[in-house]
Amino acid sequence: KSTEETLDANVAEVDGHVVNDQSTQSQLSHQEVIEEKLRTFQKFNGNGDAEQWLMYLLDKFDSLGVNMAERIIRIPNVLSNEAFIWYARSADVMPTFIAFTNLFLQRFSTKRNEEIKITTNNNNVQMSNLNQDDVFGALRSQLLLSHIEKLPKFTGRSKQNVSKWLREVNQTMHLLKLSDMEKLFYIPSCLEADAKDWFFDNYHFVPSWSLFVQKLLDTFESSSKADITFNRLRQYQQSLHQDVRQYYFEIM
């Protein structure tokens, strides 16, 4: 073969772009490949079969090797119209892809089951095709979110008392009659800064509410106490006649 034929044989077309087949992987980073593939993915606009669309999206994420932490970042790129507006308004209460999936299905998959056909006959209103469990479930979720958004946020900074914050949040969640699984589901909405980073870094190590509480206290209560003790030690002045035991108890 001639040199020109050899070069032509090595040229391939990827998503409409001509690239060198032998250097495609080096030219396009993994992130660029993901963005290119999602650019052609069918966006969800709020109509149609939401569950089927979500299944297609999960398959696409799996085939592209998109991990759970990255999936939530890609969501705005695959929504449009009503669905995008809904996401923009509710993004703060969907910090994880699992949270998005739960609320997305509650919002859109029940629409076809909630068609209300009202006919008037002798002042009687007949309602059909109404899935009441789904309606009440969606309403309950919206009410819970409105209450949870008002809870105090924990940042993980040393000035905050993690035990006091946890008691307040747990008491409110108990009044809302949340199960332990629901508490764990909604707790990221109450975390910010270092505490939120810590939660997502250790998400797989806290599969239950009790383990989350234990790990949270172990991590932030001990570090907070250490910071307080260090500051006391730095500012404290021992008196001339103070014995060692008295000095220790005042510092600790």
Image (cartoon, helix red, strand yellow):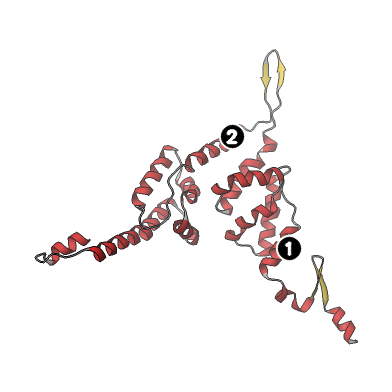
In depth, the one of 220 and 103 nearer the eye is 220
Residue 18 location (% of width, % of height): 82, 71
**Residue 36 has which mark?**
1
Q: Residue furthest bottom?
A: 2
Question: Under tag 1, what secondary structure?
Answer: helix
Which residue corresponds to mark 2? 133
Up-down relation of residue 53 to residue 8 (above or below): above
Amino acid carrying mark 2 in the image: Asp
In the drawing, does residue 19 fall left or right of residue 181? right
Residue 235 location (% of width, % of height): 24, 63
In the drawing, does residue 222 fall left or right of residue 132? left
Q: Quadrant of residue 5?
A: bottom right
Give the mark toward the camera: 1 or 2: 1
Q: Residue furthest left?
A: 241
Amino acid carrying mark 1 in the image: Glu
Up-down relation of residue 163 to residue 2 (above or below): above
Q: Quadrant of the C terminus?
A: bottom left
In depth, the one of 143 and 193 nearer the eye is 193
Q: Quadrant of the N terminus?
A: bottom right
Q: Is residue 205 visible?
A: no
Q: Residue furthest top?
A: 122
Question: Under tag 2, what secondary structure?
Answer: helix
- Residue at x 70% of width, y 62% of height: 35
**Residue 180 has which mark?**
none
Distance from disc 1 to disc 2, alpha carbons, whole Å, reads 40 Å
Up-down relation of residue 3 to residue 186 (above or below): below
In depth, the one of 16 and 49 nearer the eye is 16
Q: Residues within 10 Å of mark 2 (few under 14, many from 20)?
A: few
- Residue at x 58% of width, y 37% of height: 138
Q: Give the mark, 1 or 2, whose residue is nearer the N terminus.
A: 1
Residue 109 location (% of width, % of height): 66, 42
